[in-house]
Amino acid sequence: MLILSPSTKDTMRSVFFLGFMVFHFCISCSRAQTCRNYTFSNKNTYASCVDLPVLSSYLHWNYTPSTGTADVAFRRTGATTSRWISWAINPKGQRMVGCQALVAYMTSSGSMYAYTSSISSYNTDMPEGALSFGVPSISATYETGEMTIFARLELGTSMASVSQVWQEGPMNGPGTPGRHSTGGANMKSTGTLNFFSTGSGDGGGSSSGSSGIGSGERRKNVHGVLNAVSWGVLMPMGVLLARYLKVFKSANPAWFYLHVTCQTSAYAVGVAGWVTGLRLGDGGGGNAGTHGNIGMALFILGTLQVSFADFDSPQKRSSLYAYTSSISSYNTDMPEGALSFGVPSISATYETGEMTIFARLELGTSMASVSQVWQEGPMNGPGTPGRHSTGGANMKSTGTLNFFSTGSGDGGGSSSGSSGIGSGERRKNVHGVLNAVSWGVLMPMGVLLARYLKVFKSANPAWFYLHVTCQTSAYAVGVAGWVTGLRLGDGGGGNAGTHGNIGMALFILGTLQVFALLLRPKPDHKYRFYWNMYHHSCGYAAITLSIVNVFLGLDILDPTKVWKRTYIVILLALGCAALIMEPVTWAVVIKRRRREISQKHPTIVLNGARGNGYNGRSQDDGV
């Protein structure tokens, strides 16, 4: 008998590390573009702030109610030295004339120049001049693509709530601000500001063109979506996968990897949601109580699950040992010894949950057909194999083997009680399950999340993080399925043709989409329109090809009809969701556009359409 004494690399450490990296990525993304976690290089601190909805801009302030004094810092990321920035308020209401502006740009000498300008007409080049309220100090800085205006405003006690406008545009020459764009984000950079607000969702930073939801309210929505998807959806889904798929031998070990992927993704996204909850509590925007206590318990339970998965991994020694043993009695501990035939070479490997013994046997010509036995059991200690189970599958692992056979169902590998599924067939099943779940389910689901959730402003930016998580997970699992397909082809167990060619095309399209994420320009960038065309074209092409290829793969595998029917039901469910959400989202968009068109007051903008004016359009032009 050939005996293998096992030990392995701890695969769950890799899984946990991957989950941690996904969590770190989610936290980095969620923290990347918010005013709350920003630190000024000049050590200034501000009690209140708001993420302005367009032009990558942020406003920070301290307000003293007793004197009506406000210290403000307006900053814009992605700025260049050839452009100007401005922030203004209008004490008289939502109209252009009367705006009191702070303007800054970089001079030809390389220093920043900041000044005030009172807008008295629509056609203005923003000349320097005093404002209707005192501005005892104003300055500006430029650091690594970020331009910031600092100022103290003596507003008085009657100007606690005002209209605000922010803009950016090109310089026409030294000391001459040019005309800003009259389309896109530049036409949406208006809103109201309440200096009593903390900027955490009570209206202090509400803006036209935005949802009117402050950073605190947005955190609540992100917190809710992240936790609902992780603890409420992914976690139960992972349990169902493990409970019911492992019953089917053809799904082993794919069910395990799917279970681990689902649960670690749920844990990573759930921890991100838990952290947003902690930040809500710190900022006074959360209401913990029972909800917070249960959240803490979920975090502890999830961490325990990950920790036990890490430390309870079997077979932790650093090498594999393979040897031969001649069994002389039923009561044996399988001591090492020579066999009745020669075994000039024997070795073993362990890779991703699969243990393999390799050996050369010198049987002679009289042993072409033999009885075979295979077993597995626990280790009782270092170098001491324990007794295997005496029930269930362990009592059915016998059969006959004909070495002249190819092992393809002609009796050479027939075994009493065995499933008849070899490693090649198992790889096909793993390949099929991985690709069906990734390209065939997760990828379309990610597209639906992006297409329909982003219409609802309260779901921003949660829809984006869900979309990225879904698509990157689909790509990671899909690449694993693609690699198993390559191994099937190398081992002669695959039948490529159209199915293999489409798989290669899907891998290329998926990789292009990942690079698209890395190269994504800002929403107001002039190349964003072309990026959207490229991203959408590749995405819809990948989804179409993936669905076609899943059905081609099912035809090649030729499993029981229940698998194809299951996939058809999943597609029908996704299709029904799309049919319901398409008219709903269109109705929301049309209603929103009608409301914007019906607004009576003109949009407040800086630098108008004619000359270098703030707003060259008439008051009846609207937005």
Image (spheres, grey):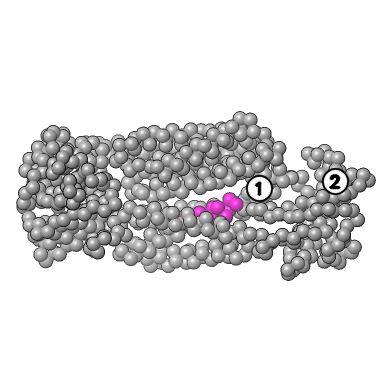
Q: Is residue 320 left or right of residue 331?
A: left
Range of magenta residues: 257-269
Q: Residue at x 77, y 58 (%)?
A: 322
Q: Is residue 275 magenta?
A: no
Instruction: Identify the residue under disc 1.
Output: 251
Eyeballing the image, is 95 above or below 44? above
Eyeballing the image, is 228 above or below 553? below
SS for callout 2: strand
Q: Residue at x 77, y 65 (%)?
A: 385
Q: In the image as oriented, which residue stretches furthest toward the right?
A: 366
Report x, y in % for residue 484.
63, 43
Q: Quadrant for the N terminus, please.
A: bottom right
How would you rate the neighbour count of disc 1 (Cα within 10 Å): few for under 14, some for 14-19, many for 20 or more?
Answer: some
* Residue 464 appears in the figure: yes
Which label lies toward us, 2 or 1?
2
Report x, y in % for residue 200.
27, 58
Eyeballing the image, is 188 above or below 16? above
Instruction: Identify the residue under disc 2.
Output: 401
Q: Quadrant of residue 159?
A: bottom left
Q: Residue at x 74, y 65 (%)?
A: 379
